[in-house]
Structure formats: structure tokens, C-alpha cells
Image (cartoon, rainbow, N blue to C red):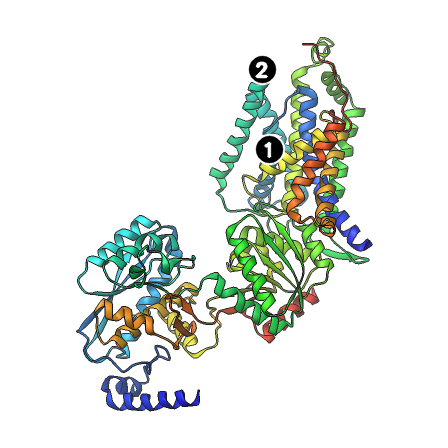
Amino acid sequence: MKYSLRVLLILLVCVAGSVPGLARAQDGGEQPPIGAWDVCPTSENLPEEVFIGTVFGVSGSVAVYGEPQQRAVDLAVTQINGSGYLGEGTTLVALHEDGGSDPETSIAAMENLAAEPDVSIIIGPTLSSQAFAADPVAAEAGIPVMGVSNTATGITTMNDDPELDQYVFRNSLPESAVIPGTVASATEILGLEQVGVMYGNDDDFTVSGYEVFQQALEEQGVEVLREETFARGDVDFSPQLTNIINDEPDAIVVSALVAEAVPIVQQARQLGYTGPIIGGNGFNSPALFEQAGAAAEGVIVGAAWNVSNPSESSQFFSTAYEEAYGGSPDQFAAQAYTGAWLAAAAIRCADSAEPDAVREALAGLADFDSPLGVYSFDEERNPVHDPVAQIVLGGQFDLLTDETAAQAFEAAAAE
Amino acid sequence: MDLTFFVQQLFNALQLGSLYALIALGYTMVYGVLLLINFAHGDIFMVGAFLGVFASMVLGLPFVAALIVSMLLTGLLGVTIERVAYKPLRHASRLSVVITALGVGLLLENGMLALTGADPRSYPEGFINTTSFSIAGVNLTSVKIIIIVLAFVLFFGLYAIVQRTKWGMAMRAISYDKFAVPLMGVSQNQIISLTFLLGASLAAAGGILWGTAFPVLSPYMGLRVGWKAFIAAVVGGIGDIRGAMLGGLLLGFIEIYTVAYGKDIGITSTWRDPIVFGLLLIILVVRPTGLFGVARRQKV
């Protein structure tokens, strides 16, 4: 650790001393606290303009996700160019294509970008279903493509030909990576010893969520007192919840879609349970506290990112985004912003705008400071970074810490 | 066994069972008078719940007023459905009427979907007092108490109407012999309308209470609940309102206690529905007419 730190320091000093672009950026105080400036030296051989493409759904029903994604990329590109990240005289240009709400529009958008002569890398599309349809277009054209919101399993291994898969990346954590982190934080902060588990046993998503929970609980040494099941469309969960509450668990762990999550949370509170409820990804939606109201206080759910993340790069991003667009960013914006910086870092490290060189550099990126945390790609081009555990407090998601947990459960006990 | 736990589940069962019972009453009354299984009844229940949302959100009515408005409007809807869809078929084959009832149900479901969209609805906050309190370790909410009390009040009110009034006597008479009674000067049409009015307004009450207990209202909410209430009516002995009440409560109790104690003998909560319906099948095998049913001879 110490050794590598020293090496980095030396490298940094060498780089700072030798490269005018970086020195200027540091002098101007504009260097964003992101982008692992020290991962590789500033590029020197890049053309005047380097192009990245984006395929975000900015029209139709997906626009609620696609619009913040596109804005976040624009913000990142402005910062990258403003800080001379790609070296003097090189400008990064984002080419936006509307991916629409359906796979067909995304394919057309991807084809347009692949037909451009100088696109180094493409970011998008918004939905997993669009990625399955459109990513092969980019891969076959030999252009790397990086999803920033695709969480379905198998995104980066979608092609029959493993050679083509080498071009498909994503930086959005799948659910299986979020839950263990949430359970670990909750166990540590709340001192969980025994829990009751409840899950929907007729749905792939909730069953796989349950399995991940089960494994994570076992790893943390948390005892499962009781498992209860329900089916999609059930509305009365009171007998199962009464069973679970009767065992006096430290927390109730629930793997459910949001339609069932809301009544489960409400009915648990009606039955007098005031403790923590730990939910799977189905709970990660504002609909939870919008519909369940005060009952949702004290619900814990994992996510890839939260706006109150205290790290320097995350705060830097949130502030810049709010200044630029006048509203606080969501997880989609944070992931898209990080995606654009990752793309720029790959171009910088490759010191080339050639898609193949960029692809290789991107695959090698590791320990990259980003709003999502310290970021790396694994060998299957999936993201590796710590998820955040969130708790519902005062009608919104906050970071789960000793303080927020104490506040949430004090308020519940007082009621 | 743990008494607090038993009592807690008892209230869960009473709540669910009395909701089933309120809906089962409508099935059983219509069957008693018309020998028609009104498969649209579950969807009338849904419309009642949504009219409650409308009354509370748009008109801003408090709980009791919204309940009365929704019961009246839904009752009129029931009467209209009978006039428009069932009356012209009164002398057609039984099968045609059942198909028509299914059609009316689909019309109500999809009409509501088109009007309100697929997003689940709920009653506004403060619509009904939802205080939680705890007595000797048993956690109750005011909603639970209101549901149970109101369901029994409505049942006894209906029972009084059927047993003590002339209208009730006419209903029972028509149920007994629908050819002879009109000859005695009783208007068959009026009695049938009254039956639909009462049945549909009880379903509306059930719908609103259901929505306060389980606040996820969707246009398809009446489907499963409707089937279960229908089965409750059959088990109780279709045609008899005491049977519907008992059948509904029985269904609620079996469901809840299967989940509550099934685990101790190795039965997971997934078995809730198979066990409920298995037990009901056994009851029907032993007593084909249901608990309160009377076998009727039919001349063919």
C-alpha cells in the first residue's frame, strides 16, 4: 500500500512537471477530483477532435431516465475539455442520438453512430432490452459500447461470439452486487443478529433477490428465524408478517416488487413493527415513500449511488450538476457522468482515438476515482465498486449511517 | 400455544373474513332470487372501491359520506346492469346469462382501466382514522376494528331487511317460487332491482373497506377477490345470507390460520390457497348444498 502510494506520488510529480496541460489545469484550480489523473500520463497524440457517441432515450416514456443521462454526459464533456484532460489542443465532442423507448429506435441510433467515421466509443443505451438489441451493432462495427444503466444479467456476455463481447461494457451494478453490500452495512450499523425473511416465490426477480439475500445473510453470520412467502398480486400479508414479528427479529428482510413492497411495509407498521425493513432492488424507487408515506421510514435499500454520498468526487459532481441544471442528480445521472469520464480516461490512456485501442485501455482501467466510489472493471467488463446502503428518513433516501439509523428508529419509537 | 399470537391472527382473520363475507352476500342474494351467478359482482366491488376514491379525492368527502355516496351509486350501477344486460335474457338459457355476466365484468374492468390507467390508487391520507394501538400485546388499528364492526352491522341490517320487512318477505317468496309469487301481486321486477341494489351496495362497502385495509386499488382487484367470495358463498350454501357470512368468515379463518400454524407442521405460506380450496372441496363433498343450503327438487 505504502509502496504503491509512493510510486503514484512520484509518477504524479513527474507527470505534473512534464506535461503543460495538466500543470495549467492545476494552476487554474479547475482539475476535477475525478478521472484518476495519475492512472496514465496526459495524451499527446490525439487528433483535434475526439468523438464519443451516446444513445439515450430522450423521447417517450424512457425520457425520465434518458434526459438526466444525456445532461450528465454533457456536463462531464464540458469538465473534461475545460480541464485539458485529453491534452492541449484536443476537444472531446459528444454526438447524441435519441434511442427512444423501444429496441428498434435504439438499433437505428446505434447504426447512425457506427456509420460516423470517427466515433471512438458509444455510451448507452438506456434500457437493458435496448442494449440486448442494439449493442451487437456497435460490437460488429468494432466500436466499444458502455451501458450506464443496464442491470440485467448477461449484458456483457450477450453475443454468441466471445470476441464481440469484448466490445460490450457496463458501469451499472447488477442487483446481485448491491444486496451483499447493503446487508453488510446494515449488519454492522444496526447490529443484526436474527432476521425474518419474506419473499415472492413466483417471480424470477424476487426469487433471485431472495437467494442473494440468503447468501449475504449467511456470510454475515445473521440467523434467519423464519422464511415466509407470498405470490404476485397478494394484498393481505398480515398473517405472514404476524408470524415474523412474533419471533421478534432485529430486522425484516423482504424481496418484493414495488407493488407488493408498499403494502408489506404498511401492514408491518400497522401490526406494530417499528424496526428496520431491508428491501431488495424493487424497493429502490421513490414510489415506496410516495405511496407508503410515513410507514416507509426506516426502510433500508441498497443502490449504486446516493446524492448524499460524502466522497469528494461525488459532491463535486452533485454541485456541478445542480449548478448546471438546477435540480439534484439521480443515480442515472451519476452513472452516465462516470461513464463519460471512464470513456475519456480510456482515450487518454490509449493516447489514441482508435476504437480498438480505446477498448483495450477501457478494459484495463482500475482503481478509478469516481462519484460511484473507487471504480474498476472486472474481467467480464462489469463494474466493481462499493454500493451504498440507503435508509428512508424524512420521506427520502439518505445514506445509512449510525446517525441516520438512530434518527429513523428514534422517530419510529416516539410515534 | 402463544395466546397473544393467536389473538393477533384472530383479528387478521376476522378482517379478511368479513371483507369476503360482504362480497359473498351479493352473490348469494342474486342467486337466491334469480338463480344467476353474477360473475360481474367482483368487478362491481372494484367499481365501488374506485367510486370511493372519486368521492374522496375529487369531491373531498370524508369516510362516512364517501361510503354512502359510493354505496348508492354502485347500487344504482347494479340495478342498471340488471336492467340492461340480464333482464332481456331472463327467459334465455342459463348459460347465455352467465356469459353475459362475464362480459359485463370485462367491460367494467377494462372501462375502469381506460378511465383511470394502470397505476395503483389509494385513498387520500386522513381519509380514515388509522390509529394503531396495542392491547395486551395485540396490535390493532382503528381500520381493522371499523371493518369488522361495519361488516357485522351491515350483515345484521341486511338480515333484518330480509326477515322482518315486506320487501324481504317478497324476496324470500320469489326465491321460493318465481312463477306463483307474481300472481299474488308482487312485482317481480321491483324485487329483482332491490336485490341488485342491496347486493351491489354491500359490494361497494366491501370495496371501500378493502381499499382502506389494503391500499392498492387496481381495475383488476375484483378478479381474485370475486372468485374467493363466490366460493365462500357456495360453501356457506348459496342462496342463504347467513351461509354467505359464515362462508366468508370461514374462508378468512382457514387462510390466515394455515399461514399462522402451517409452518409448525412444515407447510409454507405458499400452501395457503391449495389448502383453503382443498378444505372447501371436502366440505362440499360432505355437504353438496353448502353449510346452510337446502336441497331443492327441480322438475325437468
Tag 2 residue? B93
Examine the rendering and report whether any part of residue A408 can be seen: yes
**Relative to residue A174, is residue B229 depicted above or below?**
above
What amino acid is found at the position of numbered circle 2 in the picture?
A: Ser
In the image, residue A374 sits, relative to residue B55, either above or below, namely below
Disc number for residue A99: none
Name which residue type carries label 1.
Answer: Ile
- Please indicate whether residue A130 sits to the left or right of residue A253 in the image: left
Which corner quadrant of the image does residue B23 belong to? top right
Q: Which subunit holds the residue at mark 1?
A: B
Q: Position of residue B258 (x, y in %)?
A: 72, 45
Labels 1 & 2 near each other (Cβ < 8 A): no
Pointer 2 chain: B
| Label 1 secondary element | helix
Q: Position of residue A333 (x, y in %)?
A: 39, 65
Is any part of residue A393 visible from this angle?
no
At label 1, counting other C-alpha atoms closer than 10 Å, the crowd grade (few under 14, some 14-19, many 20 or more) is many
